[in-house]
DNA sequence: ATATTAAGCGGACCGCAGTCCGTTTAGAAT
DNA sequence: ATTCTAAACGGACTGCGGTCCGCTTAATAT
């Protein structure tokens, strides 16, 4: 039932992790959530986290690989929920509605997602085009958009077109307008609606 | 005649810079160009540059403010040329052609620009949404797109729509597909053409 | 020439992400 | 219980971007 493993807590083919590792993972996640709540995503450093969780710095990086990896882990629940909604949920976001309406709903849902988790999402993509463009959830979003474009009859390189539309919904970008320019979320959503509506007209 | 001051060599209202400062600026720029040519943008560090230019590290940061600032300076000639072309140059990129054709030409020119200067452009925008979205050249591109959209009769929030189209042409994004996914530039250009053509149909 | 002064300078220093490697320990095998 | 070993651990260390601040010097005034 789980979709794409966003950040496998314990990798697939291996035996269950050692008890001390499990304990440390819980300690780290709890400490990370606390620190984010207290100081905000951007102020949380890896040293701070190691210290708060009373764990060596090496352990933090062994667990999460990088700061971006940590942020992905913190996002994974919300991300899984989002995926569930647009894949299995009720229309118009989920299956059952015509592709244009699903696209519109997808954009709106993404914008809400950014409102809530934007800082985390941005931090999860920082410092690596790879993270930004090829992370499993991102690829899934793109495949979803591509599928909807095809359903709508757009057959001219829907993959690239889907990537372009995806760029439009990039968390850092959306967040920047929301926060730094004070653009209302509803306005962003309206613009997205306008964009995809025009794009799919007469297909 | 100069357009937007991309990175003022010597700020506006002040008297000409001191001779030693001028000498150091030339030394730094030359060293930076050499280092980029030798090792590639991503491998050039600020310490390396200071050392090569035989200058203190503080001087490097006094001059350019940050690594991104240095990269913007290195880009400024190419950027000014690009601006000249789409503002004053011959159609279809410059004025004289219908807006759709100018938009198409704009995207194609940007893609060529990324092919040539993409690494620099990416480095110039790194580590700051501000640099990425609100740098003077970026704002100018967006205004240009917005103007073309208006000319084409698209009157529903052309500013946000222009930003979305701009996101589509983001250097990091384009560069990522070109380099990491081996997508041909012509294919990216075709996708852009498709996107804006559909967008402006019946306006 | 000399004095004045603000711009310029340099490099020690800081905080951070990420690495390395010698040490510890959980858990299995005996 | 003892031994064994691979996984996990921790914290010193590196490299980088960026800052700070006491020193130097170019340009100007006298």
Image: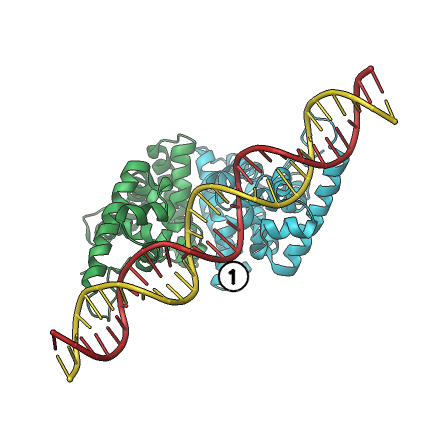
Chain colours: A cyan, B green, C red, D yellow
Q: Residue at x 37, y 52 (%)?
A: B68
Judge by depth and name the residue closer to the eye, B120 or B83: B120
Quadrant of the rendered image containing residue D24:
bottom left
Res. B151 in view? no
Badge 1: few (under 14), some or many (20 or more) residues near its Cα, within 10 Å? few
Q: Residue D5: x percent and y percent?
A: 70, 22
Q: Name the image quarter holding the N terminus of chain B.
A: bottom left
Q: Residue A42: x percent and y percent?
A: 56, 55
Q: Residue at x 63, y 55 (%)?
A: A36
Q: Residue at x 35, y 43 (%)?
A: B44
- Above or below, B33 against B83 in this view is above
Judge by depth and name the residue closer to the eye, B110 or C19: C19
User: On the rendered structure, is A13 left or right of A135?
Assistant: right
Quadrant of the rendered image containing residue A6:
top right
Q: Which residue in the structure is indicated by mark 1?
A: A179
Res. A84 in view? yes
Callout 1: residue from which chain?
A
Tag 1 secondary structure = helix
Q: Residue A134: x percent and y percent?
A: 51, 36
């Amino acid at each position: 039932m789980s979709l794409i493993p966003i950040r496998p807590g314990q990798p697939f083919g291996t035996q269950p992790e050692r008890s001390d590792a499990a304990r440390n993972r819980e300690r780290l996640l709890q400490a990370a959530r606390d620190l984010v709540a207290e100081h905000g995503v951007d102020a949380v450093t890896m040293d701070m986290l190691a210290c708060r969780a009373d764990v060596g710095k090496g352990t933090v990086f062994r667990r999460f690989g990088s700061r971006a990896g940590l942020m992905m882990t913190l996002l994974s629940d919300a991300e899984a929920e989002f995926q569930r909604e647009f894949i299995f949920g009720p229309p118009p976001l989920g299956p059952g509605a015509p592709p244009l309406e699903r696209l519109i709903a997808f954009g709106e849902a993404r914008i809400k997602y950014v409102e809530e988790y934007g800082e985390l999402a941005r931090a999860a993509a920082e410092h690596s085009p790879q993270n930004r463009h090829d992370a499993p959830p991102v690829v899934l979003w793109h495949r979803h958009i591509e599928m909807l474009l095809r359903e709508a009859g757009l057959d001219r390189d829907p993959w690239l077109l889907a990537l372009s539309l995806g760029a439009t919904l990039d968390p850092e970008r959306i967040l920047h307008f929301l926060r730094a320019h004070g653009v209302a979320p509803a306005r962003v959503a309206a613009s997205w609606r306008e964009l995809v509506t025009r794009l799919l007209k007469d297909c």
